[in-house]
Each structure stands twice: as structure tokens, then as C-alpha cells.
Image: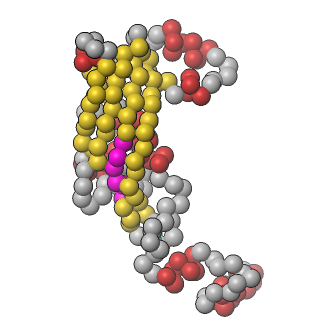
Amino acid sequence: MSAFLIHLADLTATGEKAYEFPITREWLAEALEDTEYGAPEEGTGSLEVTGREMGADVLADGRIQATLRVPCARCNEDIDWPVDLHFTQLFVPRGSYQEQHVEEEVELTPEDLERETYVGDEIALDALVRENLILEVPMTPRCPDGCADPQISAYLDKPDVKKPGPLAGLLDLKDKLGEKN
Ligand SMILES: [Zn+2]
């Protein structure tokens, strides 16, 4: 079941239509099921998107606002990670000349890579929203105000050797133990 659909029939009158969809916690939980991210404890995000007819193609551009629950890369505590991004995506009919043409091209331009295909009379944006949300989280998200346990952060951050911190002795010991093994 798609939560976010552009109906081609909506576009025929004026050539475009603006939609606004809620991004619910339930949708996030399901979409992020196979990732280490999850839905926040509360709150609903939003997807604002405008679909524009361009011949047989449809250009979707919009804004995604949502909060993800992600583990801090330093202390592993779950933190709320707000995401707010804009996207532009061109959809071409599957099996169309445009699509085949892209496949034949040896070198793809960035514009080509942004093409997706659609079938039938509606375009589901669920996969696009999911991908954009996941890509927006950095590789190593960290507690924005510092980790709750400063000792853990100091230890995991491995303070610069030239400026020994309070745990420098411990780190030295750990290094020495490591050499023996
Ligand atoms: Zn943390």
C-alpha cells in the first residue's frame, strides 16, 4: 500500500497538482524496518509535493520533513534526528523511448540518473521518500548536545595523544595490552 500517490488524472486539468501528505510514525516504522533507524516516539512528518505533467513524463518536486530515531554513533543511545529536505524527481513511463534510451547510453549524466519509471496511472512516492530520509542521516550521527555519559564520549572519541585527557592513562594501558595480543 502506497501512502504517497500522484494520480495522473489529477494533473490533466491544469498540468500540475500540489499535494500534502502526513508522514506518520506507522509509515516510518514500516519503511525503516530493515534499517537501524526507526520512527520517533511522537510527532508526524509531512511530504509536500507538486506533480507536473511534461508530456508523458511527470516531474515531482517537493519537501520532506520528518524525524527519525537513530542510534548515536558514539554512545548508541537513540536520538531524534530531524530531517528537512527538498527533492526533484523525473518519472518516465516504463518501457518508453526515454527509458530505453537511458539504458543504451554508456555514460549517464546526473540528469539521467535522476530518472525513475512509473507504470499505469499513478506514481507512488514511498520509495523515494524512504531513500531520501535514509540518505539524509549522516554516517555517524551523534547526540546533538553531547552524549549523556561524558566518560563514554571522551573514551570513544580517543582524545588527541598530544593533549592527554583524563582517560589518557587508560588508553595507553589499552594500547599496551593490545600490543601483547
Ligand atoms: Zn551519544
In this image, 17 relative to 164: left or right?
left
Q: Which image quarter is the C terminus in?
A: bottom right
> Would residue 177 be visible to someone looking at this image?
no
Q: Which residue is drawn at 44% across and 72% down?
A: 145
Q: Which image quarter is the N terminus in?
A: top left
Is residue 39 positioned above or below 161 on the image? above
Q: Residue at x 57, y 75 (%)?
A: 156
Foreground pick, 118 / 17: 17
- State whether the magenta stretch is mostly helix, strand or loop: strand
Is residue 45 positioned above or below 18 on the image? below
| Coloration of the structure image | secondary structure
Is residue 24 inside the magenta stretch? no
For residue 155, what is the image quadrant?
A: bottom right
Q: Give the range drawn in magenta.
A: 64-69
* Residue 157 locus on image (x, y percent): 59, 74
* Residue 92 locus on image (x, y percent): 44, 17
For residue 88, what is the image quadrant?
A: top left
Is residue 93 positioned above or below 127 on the image? above
In the displayed orientation, state which residue is furthest to the front: 14
Q: Residue at x 42, y 78 (%)?
A: 148
> Would residue 90 be visible to someone looking at this image?
yes
Q: Which residue is drawn at 32% across and 15% down?
A: 15
* Residue 64 locus on image (x, y percent): 36, 42
